[in-house]
Image: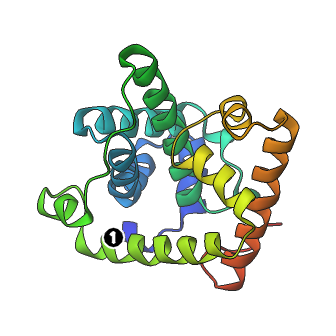
Amino acid sequence: MQPASVSDQALMERVVSRDPSALDVLYERYARAVYSLVYRILGDGSAAEDVVQEVFLKLWKQPESYNAERGALGSWLLSVAHNRAIDQLRRRKSREEHPLPELRESEELVADGALDPADLAGLNEAAAAIRRALAQIPPAQRRAIEMAFFEGKTHVEIAAELDEPLGTAKTRIRLGMRKLRSILEAEGVVTQTA
């Protein structure tokens, strides 16, 4: 059986059964996308590699933390990676008191070998769909989402910066994310979950 023909679900069943070869296949399948996302957030190759290792170590040690009913494995891995990268960015900011690093251009990532051209095309397509979807939600919700996901701010920081109650900031993010999901599902970018 070719690794490419084995479904993520079948591989996850093997990971739960402690089959390291299944984890190897999943690593080969998703490590590059996870690295690319983390690198764009942190701007540091070494730190991105560390986060990739943390993500796959979590998958190995706690495979039950992934729930197939809530979405695709690739999306879950990217979500875990995003959260770890933002945590690391916050730690770095608190230690160094520096602003967020500049994001590298996609072409630089391809030239450095951090991103495959085919992956770049998929990421660019997804990014364009997300930008279109963000443009369709109310500005207050869009701003709160941008602050949370692109600037790495906490709900408390967002509420303070927007001069709003904490509950309002959380609600804006939650409602905005629901609208984004609905728009992206309609475009076929994400699949509906149970």
Q: How many marks?
A: 1
Q: Is residue 124 above or below residue 24?
A: below
Q: Residue type at mark 1?
A: Asp
Q: Quadrant of residue 113?
A: bottom left
Q: x, y percentage for residue 124?
A: 39, 74
Q: Which of 34 and 42 is in front in this view?
A: 42
Classify residue 155 as left or right of residue 93: right
Q: Nearer the viewer, residue 113 or 17?
A: 113
Q: In this view, does 57 lie above or below 168?
A: above
Q: x, y percentage for residue 39?
A: 32, 46
Q: x, y percentage for residue 6?
A: 48, 68
- The single residue placed furthest to the front in the displayed view is 163
User: Where does the C terminus fall, quadrant-wise?
Assistant: bottom right
Q: Nearer the viewer, residue 110 or 70?
A: 110
- The single residue placed furthest to the top in the displayed view is 95
Quickly name the residue at label 1. 119
